[in-house]
Amino acid sequence: ISFHVEFGPLASPSFEVGRPSAQAISVANFVERLLRGSRAIDAEALCIVSGQKVWSIRVDVRAMDDDGNLSDVCAIAALCALLHFRKADVEVKGDSAEAFAVEERAPVPLSVHHLPVPVTFALFGGKETEAAWVLDPNRLEEAAMSGSLCIAVNQHGELCGVHKPGGLPVDLAMLQSCMDLAKSKAKEITGRINSELEADLAQRQQAKRNVHQQFSEEKLLTVDWAESTTAEAPQPVPVAPLPPRPVRPDVRPAAPPVPAKAMAVTEAAEVEAEELPAPAPATPADKATAPKAVPPGAVPAAPPAAPPVSAEPKKNRWKRART
Protein backbone atom coordinates (compact mmCIF):
# COMPACT_ATOMS: atom_id res chain seq x y z
CA ILE A 1 0.00 0.00 0.00
CA SER A 2 1.36 3.40 -0.99
CA PHE A 3 0.00 6.88 -0.25
CA HIS A 4 0.49 10.01 -2.33
CA VAL A 5 -0.71 13.51 -1.39
CA GLU A 6 -0.92 16.44 -3.80
CA PHE A 7 -1.56 20.08 -2.93
CA GLY A 8 -2.20 22.32 -5.94
CA PRO A 9 -3.29 25.90 -6.61
CA LEU A 10 -6.89 24.75 -6.49
CA ALA A 11 -6.60 24.26 -2.72
CA SER A 12 -4.67 27.44 -1.96
CA PRO A 13 -2.72 30.08 -3.91
CA SER A 14 0.33 29.33 -1.75
CA PHE A 15 0.71 25.90 -3.41
CA GLU A 16 2.52 25.62 -6.72
CA VAL A 17 2.06 23.33 -9.71
CA GLY A 18 4.69 20.70 -10.35
CA ARG A 19 6.63 18.64 -7.88
CA PRO A 20 4.99 17.87 -4.49
CA SER A 21 5.73 20.49 -1.86
CA ALA A 22 7.41 19.80 1.45
CA GLN A 23 4.07 20.06 3.24
CA ALA A 24 2.48 17.48 0.88
CA ILE A 25 5.36 15.04 1.43
CA SER A 26 5.13 15.52 5.20
CA VAL A 27 1.37 14.83 5.17
CA ALA A 28 1.85 11.74 2.96
CA ASN A 29 4.41 10.33 5.41
CA PHE A 30 2.06 11.08 8.31
CA VAL A 31 -0.83 9.20 6.65
CA GLU A 32 1.39 6.23 5.81
CA ARG A 33 2.76 5.97 9.35
CA LEU A 34 -0.74 6.25 10.79
CA LEU A 35 -2.44 3.58 8.66
CA ARG A 36 0.45 1.21 8.12
CA GLY A 37 2.22 1.72 11.44
CA SER A 38 -0.91 1.06 13.45
CA ARG A 39 -1.57 -2.08 11.34
CA ALA A 40 -5.07 -0.94 10.56
CA ILE A 41 -4.91 -2.60 7.11
CA ASP A 42 -4.13 -6.31 6.89
CA ALA A 43 -1.26 -6.29 4.39
CA GLU A 44 -0.92 -10.08 4.42
CA ALA A 45 -4.44 -10.43 2.99
CA LEU A 46 -3.22 -8.69 -0.18
CA CYS A 47 -0.98 -11.67 -1.04
CA ILE A 48 -2.40 -13.89 -3.81
CA VAL A 49 0.39 -16.38 -4.51
CA SER A 50 3.32 -16.41 -2.10
CA GLY A 51 6.39 -14.87 -3.71
CA GLN A 52 4.70 -14.39 -7.10
CA LYS A 53 1.52 -12.32 -7.11
CA VAL A 54 0.19 -9.67 -4.75
CA TRP A 55 -2.32 -6.84 -4.87
CA SER A 56 -0.79 -3.36 -5.13
CA ILE A 57 -2.95 -0.52 -3.81
CA ARG A 58 -2.16 3.15 -4.39
CA VAL A 59 -4.09 5.87 -2.56
CA ASP A 60 -3.98 9.34 -4.15
CA VAL A 61 -5.22 12.29 -2.09
CA ARG A 62 -5.78 15.69 -3.70
CA ALA A 63 -6.76 18.73 -1.68
CA MET A 64 -9.67 20.77 -3.06
CA ASP A 65 -9.79 23.61 -0.50
CA ASP A 66 -7.25 24.42 2.21
CA ASP A 67 -9.00 25.78 5.30
CA GLY A 68 -6.54 24.31 7.77
CA ASN A 69 -5.71 20.93 9.35
CA LEU A 70 -5.02 19.18 6.04
CA SER A 71 -3.20 16.32 7.78
CA ASP A 72 -6.33 15.10 9.58
CA VAL A 73 -8.48 15.58 6.50
CA CYS A 74 -6.12 13.59 4.25
CA ALA A 75 -5.80 10.76 6.79
CA ILE A 76 -9.58 10.41 7.23
CA ALA A 77 -10.11 10.62 3.45
CA ALA A 78 -7.56 7.85 2.82
CA LEU A 79 -9.15 5.70 5.52
CA CYS A 80 -12.62 6.13 4.03
CA ALA A 81 -11.30 5.32 0.56
CA LEU A 82 -9.80 2.04 1.79
CA LEU A 83 -13.03 1.11 3.55
CA HIS A 84 -15.09 1.86 0.46
CA PHE A 85 -12.74 0.06 -1.95
CA ARG A 86 -13.62 -3.40 -3.33
CA LYS A 87 -11.11 -5.68 -5.03
CA ALA A 88 -11.84 -8.45 -7.48
CA ASP A 89 -12.39 -11.93 -6.11
CA VAL A 90 -9.52 -14.32 -6.88
CA GLU A 91 -9.46 -18.11 -7.06
CA VAL A 92 -6.05 -19.76 -6.60
CA LYS A 93 -5.31 -23.16 -8.14
CA GLY A 94 -1.75 -24.25 -7.46
CA ASP A 95 0.58 -21.58 -8.79
CA SER A 96 -2.06 -19.96 -11.00
CA ALA A 97 -4.67 -17.41 -9.96
CA GLU A 98 -7.84 -16.34 -11.75
CA ALA A 99 -9.45 -12.96 -11.07
CA PHE A 100 -13.21 -12.76 -11.68
CA ALA A 101 -15.00 -9.77 -13.15
CA VAL A 102 -17.72 -7.86 -11.34
CA GLU A 103 -20.42 -9.59 -13.43
CA GLU A 104 -19.15 -13.05 -12.45
CA ARG A 105 -18.51 -12.59 -8.72
CA ALA A 106 -19.12 -9.80 -6.27
CA PRO A 107 -15.95 -7.85 -5.32
CA VAL A 108 -14.66 -8.29 -1.76
CA PRO A 109 -13.62 -5.48 0.64
CA LEU A 110 -10.21 -5.06 2.19
CA SER A 111 -9.44 -6.51 5.59
CA VAL A 112 -9.46 -3.54 8.02
CA HIS A 113 -8.82 -4.28 11.70
CA HIS A 114 -9.66 -0.89 13.24
CA LEU A 115 -10.17 2.75 12.34
CA PRO A 116 -7.41 5.09 13.58
CA VAL A 117 -8.67 8.67 13.55
CA PRO A 118 -6.23 11.59 14.04
CA VAL A 119 -7.25 14.56 16.21
CA THR A 120 -5.03 17.65 15.99
CA PHE A 121 -4.70 20.42 18.58
CA ALA A 122 -3.14 23.83 17.93
CA LEU A 123 -1.01 25.04 20.86
CA PHE A 124 -0.75 28.69 21.87
CA GLY A 125 1.26 30.35 24.64
CA GLY A 126 4.76 31.33 25.65
CA LYS A 127 7.37 30.78 28.30
CA GLU A 128 5.70 33.07 30.84
CA THR A 129 2.01 32.33 29.98
CA GLU A 130 0.08 29.12 30.41
CA ALA A 131 -0.27 27.02 27.25
CA ALA A 132 -3.66 26.84 25.57
CA TRP A 133 -4.97 24.63 22.81
CA VAL A 134 -7.57 24.79 20.01
CA LEU A 135 -9.18 21.68 18.55
CA ASP A 136 -9.13 21.31 14.74
CA PRO A 137 -7.45 24.65 13.86
CA ASN A 138 -8.30 26.49 10.67
CA ARG A 139 -5.89 28.20 8.26
CA LEU A 140 -5.58 31.44 10.25
CA GLU A 141 -5.10 29.59 13.54
CA GLU A 142 -2.38 27.45 12.01
CA ALA A 143 -0.55 30.59 10.90
CA ALA A 144 -0.59 31.99 14.47
CA MET A 145 -0.07 28.79 16.53
CA SER A 146 3.13 28.04 18.43
CA GLY A 147 2.98 24.28 17.89
CA SER A 148 0.66 21.34 17.19
CA LEU A 149 -0.18 18.05 18.83
CA CYS A 150 -1.86 15.13 17.00
CA ILE A 151 -3.34 12.16 18.87
CA ALA A 152 -4.67 9.14 16.92
CA VAL A 153 -7.39 7.05 18.59
CA ASN A 154 -9.51 4.24 17.13
CA GLN A 155 -13.22 3.49 17.60
CA HIS A 156 -12.48 1.37 20.69
CA GLY A 157 -10.79 4.27 22.50
CA GLU A 158 -7.32 2.75 22.08
CA LEU A 159 -4.33 5.01 21.52
CA CYS A 160 -2.81 4.44 18.09
CA GLY A 161 -0.15 7.16 18.01
CA VAL A 162 1.01 10.61 19.10
CA HIS A 163 2.55 13.07 16.66
CA LYS A 164 4.36 16.17 18.03
CA PRO A 165 6.30 17.98 15.26
CA GLY A 166 8.25 20.37 17.54
CA GLY A 167 7.00 23.74 18.71
CA LEU A 168 5.67 24.56 22.14
CA PRO A 169 6.31 21.85 24.76
CA VAL A 170 3.38 20.34 26.67
CA ASP A 171 3.16 18.84 30.10
CA LEU A 172 1.59 15.53 31.11
CA ALA A 173 -1.64 17.06 32.40
CA MET A 174 -2.34 18.80 29.10
CA LEU A 175 -1.50 15.64 27.21
CA GLN A 176 -3.92 13.63 29.33
CA SER A 177 -6.76 16.12 28.82
CA CYS A 178 -6.11 16.17 25.08
CA MET A 179 -6.23 12.37 24.96
CA ASP A 180 -9.59 12.27 26.73
CA LEU A 181 -11.00 14.81 24.33
CA ALA A 182 -9.52 12.93 21.36
CA LYS A 183 -11.28 9.69 22.41
CA SER A 184 -14.71 11.29 22.40
CA LYS A 185 -13.98 13.06 19.12
CA ALA A 186 -12.71 9.83 17.51
CA LYS A 187 -15.89 7.95 18.50
CA GLU A 188 -17.97 10.68 16.92
CA ILE A 189 -16.00 10.60 13.67
CA THR A 190 -15.92 6.78 13.44
CA GLY A 191 -19.67 6.66 14.06
CA ARG A 192 -20.20 9.09 11.19
CA ILE A 193 -17.94 7.01 8.92
CA ASN A 194 -19.72 3.74 9.78
CA SER A 195 -23.15 5.22 9.16
CA GLU A 196 -22.13 6.53 5.75
CA LEU A 197 -20.57 3.18 4.81
CA GLU A 198 -23.69 1.28 5.87
CA ALA A 199 -25.87 3.60 3.78
CA ASP A 200 -23.57 3.09 0.79
CA LEU A 201 -23.65 -0.70 1.27
CA ALA A 202 -27.46 -0.70 1.40
CA GLN A 203 -27.53 1.36 -1.79
CA ARG A 204 -25.20 -1.11 -3.52
CA GLN A 205 -27.35 -4.08 -2.51
CA GLN A 206 -30.49 -2.31 -3.69
CA ALA A 207 -28.85 -1.54 -7.04
CA LYS A 208 -27.75 -5.16 -7.36
CA ARG A 209 -31.24 -6.41 -6.52
CA ASN A 210 -32.95 -4.08 -9.01
CA VAL A 211 -30.30 -4.29 -11.68
CA HIS A 212 -32.99 -4.20 -14.43
CA GLN A 213 -34.37 -0.90 -13.12
CA GLN A 214 -32.59 2.30 -14.03
CA PHE A 215 -34.55 4.57 -11.66
CA SER A 216 -36.14 3.99 -8.26
CA GLU A 217 -39.88 4.22 -7.68
CA GLU A 218 -39.53 7.53 -5.80
CA LYS A 219 -38.01 9.18 -8.87
CA LEU A 220 -40.69 7.95 -11.30
CA LEU A 221 -43.59 10.18 -12.31
CA THR A 222 -46.94 8.40 -12.59
CA VAL A 223 -49.92 9.81 -14.46
CA ASP A 224 -53.52 8.54 -14.12
CA TRP A 225 -54.64 8.53 -17.74
CA ALA A 226 -58.25 7.60 -16.88
CA GLU A 227 -58.81 10.73 -14.78
CA SER A 228 -56.90 12.98 -17.12
CA THR A 229 -58.86 11.83 -20.17
CA THR A 230 -62.25 12.19 -18.46
CA ALA A 231 -61.42 15.54 -16.91
CA GLU A 232 -59.82 17.08 -19.93
CA ALA A 233 -61.52 15.37 -22.84
CA PRO A 234 -60.94 17.38 -26.02
CA GLN A 235 -64.04 18.74 -27.74
CA PRO A 236 -64.59 17.68 -31.37
CA VAL A 237 -63.54 20.30 -33.82
CA PRO A 238 -66.34 21.26 -36.25
CA VAL A 239 -65.49 20.48 -39.83
CA ALA A 240 -66.52 23.02 -42.44
CA PRO A 241 -68.58 21.55 -45.33
CA LEU A 242 -66.84 21.21 -48.61
CA PRO A 243 -67.93 23.57 -51.41
CA PRO A 244 -70.20 22.00 -54.07
CA ARG A 245 -68.36 20.55 -56.98
CA PRO A 246 -69.15 22.38 -60.25
CA VAL A 247 -71.03 20.23 -62.75
CA ARG A 248 -69.67 20.50 -66.21
CA PRO A 249 -72.36 20.50 -68.98
CA ASP A 250 -72.40 17.43 -71.16
CA VAL A 251 -71.56 18.99 -74.48
CA ARG A 252 -71.30 16.55 -77.31
CA PRO A 253 -70.45 17.45 -80.88
CA ALA A 254 -73.43 17.47 -83.27
CA ALA A 255 -73.65 14.72 -85.88
CA PRO A 256 -72.60 15.84 -89.37
CA PRO A 257 -75.52 16.46 -91.75
CA VAL A 258 -76.37 13.62 -94.14
CA PRO A 259 -76.25 14.61 -97.80
CA ALA A 260 -79.60 14.76 -99.62
CA LYS A 261 -78.45 12.29 -102.27
CA ALA A 262 -77.50 9.69 -99.67
CA MET A 263 -80.87 10.13 -97.97
CA ALA A 264 -82.67 9.62 -101.29
CA VAL A 265 -80.71 6.43 -102.02
CA THR A 266 -81.49 5.10 -98.53
CA GLU A 267 -85.21 5.80 -98.91
CA ALA A 268 -85.27 4.11 -102.33
CA ALA A 269 -83.59 1.01 -100.89
CA GLU A 270 -86.18 0.81 -98.11
CA VAL A 271 -89.05 1.13 -100.61
CA GLU A 272 -87.63 -1.65 -102.79
CA ALA A 273 -87.23 -3.87 -99.73
CA GLU A 274 -90.86 -3.32 -98.79
CA GLU A 275 -92.14 -4.07 -102.39
CA LEU A 276 -90.28 -7.36 -102.80
CA PRO A 277 -92.77 -10.29 -102.74
CA ALA A 278 -92.39 -13.24 -100.40
CA PRO A 279 -90.72 -16.33 -101.90
CA ALA A 280 -93.24 -18.78 -103.46
CA PRO A 281 -93.43 -22.39 -102.21
CA ALA A 282 -91.46 -24.99 -104.17
CA THR A 283 -93.39 -26.81 -106.96
CA PRO A 284 -92.93 -30.45 -108.14
CA ALA A 285 -91.09 -29.15 -111.15
CA ASP A 286 -88.64 -27.25 -108.96
CA LYS A 287 -88.09 -30.37 -106.88
CA ALA A 288 -87.38 -32.36 -110.03
CA THR A 289 -84.82 -29.79 -111.20
CA ALA A 290 -83.16 -29.58 -107.73
CA PRO A 291 -79.77 -31.35 -107.51
CA LYS A 292 -79.98 -34.82 -106.06
CA ALA A 293 -77.70 -36.15 -103.32
CA VAL A 294 -74.76 -38.13 -104.67
CA PRO A 295 -74.20 -41.49 -102.91
CA PRO A 296 -70.70 -42.10 -101.53
CA GLY A 297 -68.30 -43.52 -104.11
CA ALA A 298 -70.30 -42.27 -107.17
CA VAL A 299 -69.07 -39.67 -109.62
CA PRO A 300 -71.15 -36.49 -109.49
CA ALA A 301 -72.89 -35.40 -112.67
CA ALA A 302 -71.65 -32.41 -114.56
CA PRO A 303 -73.37 -29.14 -113.61
CA PRO A 304 -75.79 -27.64 -116.20
CA ALA A 305 -74.39 -25.22 -118.69
CA ALA A 306 -74.46 -21.53 -117.79
CA PRO A 307 -76.90 -19.35 -119.71
CA PRO A 308 -75.41 -17.39 -122.55
CA VAL A 309 -74.03 -14.00 -121.67
CA SER A 310 -75.85 -11.18 -123.31
CA ALA A 311 -73.86 -9.26 -125.79
CA GLU A 312 -75.58 -6.06 -124.83
CA PRO A 313 -73.19 -3.27 -123.99
CA LYS A 314 -72.35 -2.71 -120.33
CA LYS A 315 -73.54 0.86 -120.43
CA ASN A 316 -77.05 -0.15 -121.44
CA ARG A 317 -77.23 -2.75 -118.66
CA TRP A 318 -76.52 -0.11 -116.00
CA LYS A 319 -79.21 2.15 -117.44
CA ARG A 320 -81.76 -0.62 -117.32
CA ALA A 321 -80.84 -1.46 -113.77
CA ARG A 322 -81.35 2.12 -112.71
CA THR A 323 -84.75 2.32 -114.41
Image: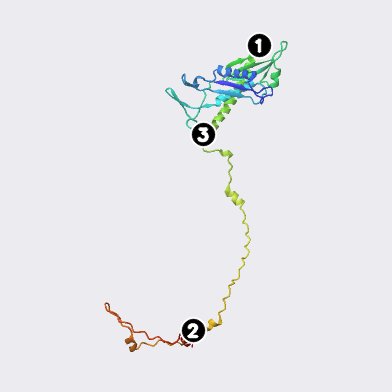
Identify residue type, mark 3.
Answer: Lys
Earlier in the chain: of badge 1 and badge 2, it is: 1
Rendered image quadrant of residue 18: top right
Using residue 178 as the reference point, say whether residue 1 is left or right of it.
left
Give the image location of residue 294, x and y in percent. 29, 80
Distance in Å between CA atoms under marks 3 and 2: 109 Å
Residue carrying label 1: 171
Give the image location of residue 83, x and y in percent. 55, 25
Distance in Å between CA atoms under marks 1 and 3: 54 Å
Residue carrying label 2: 269
Identify residue type, mark 1.
Answer: Asp
Distance in Å between CA atoms under marks 1 and 2: 158 Å
How packed mark 1 is, by other alpha carbons closer than 10 Å (few <14, some 14-19, many 20 or more), is few
How packed mark 3 is, by other alpha carbons closer than 10 Å (few <14, some 14-19, many 20 or more), is few
Give the image location of residue 198, x and y in percent. 55, 28
Rendered image quadrant of residue 143: top right
Using residue 243 as the reference point, say whether residue 273 is left or right of it.
left
Residue carrying label 3: 208
In the picture shown, does residue 225 fall above or below 261?
above
In the picture shown, does residue 129 fall above or below 198?
above
